[in-house]
Image: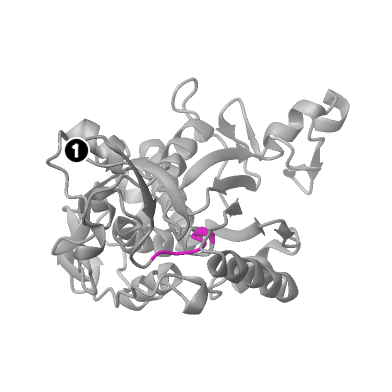
Amino acid sequence: MKNILGNHLTLTLFGESHGKYVGAVLDGLAPGLEVNEEFISHQLTLRRPEGNISTSRVEKDPFEIASGVFKGFTTGTPLTIIIPNGDTRSDDYEPRAARPSHADYAAHLKYHGFEDYRGGGHFSGRITSAIVAAAAIIIYALRKKGVYIATHIKHIAGIYDRDFDDISRDIDILSTKVFAALDEEKASLMREEILKAKADGDSVGGVLESIITGLPGGLGEPYFDSVESLLAHAIFSVPAVKGVEFGDGFDIAKMRGSAANDAMANVDGKIALSSLHSGGIYGGITVGENILIRTAIKPTPTIGKNQNTINIPDLENTTLQGKGRHDPCIVQRARVVIDSVIALTLADILTGRFGTDWMAEK
């Protein structure tokens, strides 16, 4: 199993949902990056369950930085973050009926029955807390270099948020929102749809829309390490992600070239695009413009309705009504995880282009 993301700056994940800890190791960090533990805690709150639209399993995430930081700054050696697990109810996962559209059966095939299946084990969304904690250090450093990442809920259950408008203002708004919709009225309607699904013993999915600002042009290594390739690889690694598109994505196939092309102009010495139909990336390379990405998140597979499935390991047919504590919608919690894997990927690309110390340069 490969648990390492990145080439020049790498993230290694470890742990299981109901194990003692989850955690991450960052290797290849520049020495001298400020580590703001309050910011790490803030980022973790954005991933945490919220009220009756989320699971009732609420972890406090009291993280510990075990290595790689001295007097509040990175040392340049591997940085390890450990987050203890708690509030687990492992009995909810016996007997073993495979949850449809979950990783239960796939994990059984890969690990021959030796996998820790409690709470989804290593395939649980719980593991993403370590991603968020580690990436918070990167996000904080990127902001100091003028690179910002923000994600809002594009739609849930057919309820659409407004588009990005004033980008700087919207980034500020989203930086503190737990439920990351820009339009408060639409946010309320989304919550209502989540609660309706919950009342039916069901779940809903949605789409997240991310914007990246402040990246220099010339990033990307075509063919196989293009910016889209690396970002899509990282985003698809997040549990529940089933689709990634840049700019207009699949809708661009419906256009003529005259409509799909992004006109260019020199505005006060800087090249500006008239639109982001191609997402701000050309030939797999950044051009110094904003980058627009959308991510499709599937409905949570564990639901309260009866579903046909099989038992593990005897593979006998059975039915399953999901037990345990699960989110009727994971979209709002996945938002900060998407921000995090984007940040990790961008930092890896930037480190490869400009060298390890670039992240810490003033």
Q: Does residue 217 appear in this view?
A: yes
- Residue at (12%, 41%) from the top-left corner? 114
Identify the residue under disc 1.
Answer: 313
Instruction: Characterize the magenta stretch by its predominant secondary structure.
Output: loop
Give the x, y percent position of residue 232. 49, 37
227 in the magenta segment: no
- Amino acid at circle 1: Pro
Q: Which residues are magenta?
A: 326-331
237 over 59 or under it: above or below: above
Q: Is residue 7 left or right of residue 240?
A: left
User: Mark 1: which secondary structure?
Assistant: loop
Q: Quadrant of the N terminus?
A: top left
Q: Is residue 327 magenta?
A: yes
Specify few, some or many for label 1: CA neighbours under 10 Å numbering under 14, 14-19, or 20 or more. Answer: some
At a point 75% along the width and 31% down the height, the residue shown is 252
Q: Front-most of 286 and 135?
A: 135
Query: Would you say 42 lies left or right of 149 here?
Result: left
